[in-house]
Image (cartoon, rainbow, N blue to C red):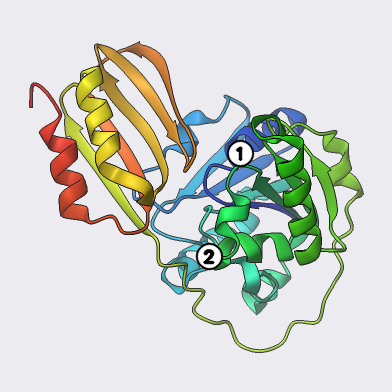
């Protein structure tokens, strides 16, 4: 059977950063990366470091949701039978409710092909305490993890770190827990994890995600700084995650935003293309699209 590591964690917790470290750590092994994003365009795949691996993207919902489950099962079967990697790394969308994870991997079509050897969950110190009482996904991800990385400890005070640790410990008292910055920890820890085999019973549920909406925005044009700031302000407090690439003041710019911060990184000369995935609550597609298109110059 193909050993499989599952990476979970809410939106912006640092999964792609960790995945890049794992690609480097496991260099030399036949590696397949299965990246699951909630938006209809793949952003994370473009952020992965170059390497000798196969990248496969599922970009229309959570792999634990009934809407994507068949695609996931078919793809894992193909990976196991045709690609035959030494290791399969799966990055689940930040909105994945992993409560039925064991049932998924115990399906007759998968249980003889792949073995889930470790589930790693990243917890964002900045946002976890706000999210755990209003959304299922962050709680489910923690409860089903073997290793929990309480990440971004450098971005909050020590008292908040300890509050997050205490909350996580209450949800997952048996999981190994590490405090991290930039998802850095000794990666050989993964090789020592022995995921307990729990009995699996009952049919799969629908795996419905939390009531969070994802909008994909694509258009030609260029933002100036003021227009971009007005667009971001229009999204309001409902914004949970935004990522993608925009043309900003003549520069192609990578956008990486969570509930608490927005980072802009110039990557080269602008090409006039804008591609954003926006995830949040209480956001209306027509209003978001109108604000987005209304600030673009040269359309």
276 left or right of 287?
right
Q: What's the residue at 81%, 34% (across, down)?
A: 185
Considering the numbered disc 2 on the image, is that residue within a helix, a strand or a loop?
loop
Query: Residue at left 42%, top 60%?
Result: 61
Disc 2 or 1, which lies upstream in sequence? 1
Q: Point out residue 217 in the picture as x, y percentages from the top left corner.
A: 25, 42
Q: Quadrant of the N terminus?
A: bottom right
* Residue situated furthest front in the rendering: 159
Q: How many marks?
A: 2
- In the image, what residue occupies the spot 49% across and 39% down? 260
Q: Nearer the viewer, mark 2 or mark 1?
A: 2
Picture coordinates of residue 280, whole percent (x, y): 38, 53
Are the residues tagged 2 and 1 within 8 Å (C-beta)? no
The image position of residue 8, as x and y in percent, is 63, 53
Q: Nearer the viewer, residue 161 or 101?
A: 161
Q: Is residue 269 above or below residue 190?
A: above
With 256 as the anchor, is 291 left or right in this view? left
- Outermost residue, left side: 299
Separation of marks 2 and 1 at Cα, in angstroms: 19 Å
Which disc is residue 14 wearing? 1
Per the image, the residue denoted by label 2 is 135
Point 47% across, 47% down: residue: 57
54 or 44: nearer the eye? 44
Q: Looking at the image, can residue 144 be seen?
A: no
User: How dense is the environment of label 2, judged by Cα within 10 Å: few (below 14), some, or many (20 and up)?
Assistant: some
Where disc 1 sits, the SS reads loop
Q: Quadrant of the C terminus?
A: top left
């Amino acid at each position: 059977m193909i050993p499989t590591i599952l990476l979970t964690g809410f939106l912006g917790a640092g999964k792609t950063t960790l995945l890049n470290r794992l690609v480097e750590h496991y260099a030399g092994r036949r590696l397949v990366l299965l990246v699951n994003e909630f938006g209809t365009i793949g952003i994370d795949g473009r952020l992965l470091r170059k390497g000798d691996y196969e990248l496969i993207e599922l970009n229309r919902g959570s792999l634990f949701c009934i809407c994507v489950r068949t695609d996931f099962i078919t793809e894992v079967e193909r990976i196991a039978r045709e690609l035959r990697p030494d290791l399969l790394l799966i990055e689940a969308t930040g909105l994945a409710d992993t409560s039925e994870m064991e049932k998924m991997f115990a399906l007759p079509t998968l249980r003889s092909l792949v073995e889930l050897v470790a589930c790693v969950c990243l917890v964002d110190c900045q946002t976890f305490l706000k999210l755990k009482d209003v959304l299922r996904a962050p709680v489910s991800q923690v409860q089903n993890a073997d290793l929990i990385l309480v990440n971004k400890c450098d971005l909050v005070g020590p008292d908040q770190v300890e509050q997050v640790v205490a909350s996580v410990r209450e949800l997952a008292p048996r999981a190994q827990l590490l405090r991290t910055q930039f998802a850095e920890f000794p990666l050989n820890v993964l090789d020592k994890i022995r995921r307990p085999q729990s009995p699996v019973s009952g049919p799969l549920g629908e795996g419905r995600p939390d009531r969070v909406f994802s909008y994909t925005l694509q258009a030609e044009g260029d933002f100036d700084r003021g227009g971009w700031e007005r667009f971001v302000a229009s999204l309001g407090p409902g914004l949970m995650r935004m990522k993608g690439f925009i043309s900003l003041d003549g520069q192609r710019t990578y956008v990486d935003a969570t509930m608490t911060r927005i980072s802009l990184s110039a990557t080269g000369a602008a090409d006039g293309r804008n591609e954003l995935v926006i995830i949040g609550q209480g956001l209306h597609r027509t209003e978001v699209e109108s604000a987005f298109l209304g600030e673009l110059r040269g359309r």
